[in-house]
Image (spheres, rainbow, N blue to C red):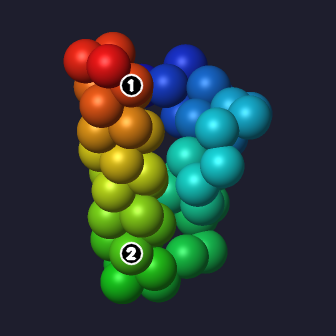
Amino acid sequence: MDLLHTCAEESSVHGLSHLVVKDRHWFERVAWAVIVALSIYCSYAVYMSTWTR
């Protein structure tokens, strides 16, 4: 588990480091998780629309 925490903390993917900081409020972590999930979904949607052309 420490390895995943370290990887998320040092990741260059914006938003992941905000999920593992110890002094964050739970609502802020949930908000960042939603933001990261939405960005992954939108990236996938753009990829699929480009792929089908």
Q: Residue drawn at (25%, 18%), measured in percent from left and top?
A: 52
27 displayed left or right of 15: left
10 displayed left or right of 50: right
Q: Quadrant of the C terminus?
A: top left
Dot 2 corresponds to which residue? 31
The percent coordinates of residue 20 (x first, y second) are: 54, 53
42 displayed left or right of 18: left
The percent coordinates of residue 44 (x first, y second) are: 33, 33
**Type of residue at label 2?**
Ala
Q: Is residue 4 placed above or below 51 in the rendered structure? A: below
Assign a secondary structure to mark 1: helix
Front residue of 18 and 37: 37
Assign a secondary structure to mark 2: helix
Q: Is residue 17 placed above or below 53 in the rendered structure? A: below
Query: Residue pushed farthest front?
Result: 53
Q: Is residue 33 visible?
A: no
Callout 2 crowding tier (Cα within 10 Å): few <14, some 14–19, many ≥20 = some
- Residue 8 is drawn in which quadrant? top right
Q: Residue drawn at (42%, 64%), measured in percent from left and top?
A: 35
- Residue 6 is drawn in which quadrant? top right
**Type of residue at label 1?**
Thr
The image's mark for residue 50 is 1
Q: CA distance from mark 2 to mark 1?
A: 29 Å
The percent coordinates of residue 50 (x first, y second) are: 39, 25
Please count the marks in the image. Answer: 2
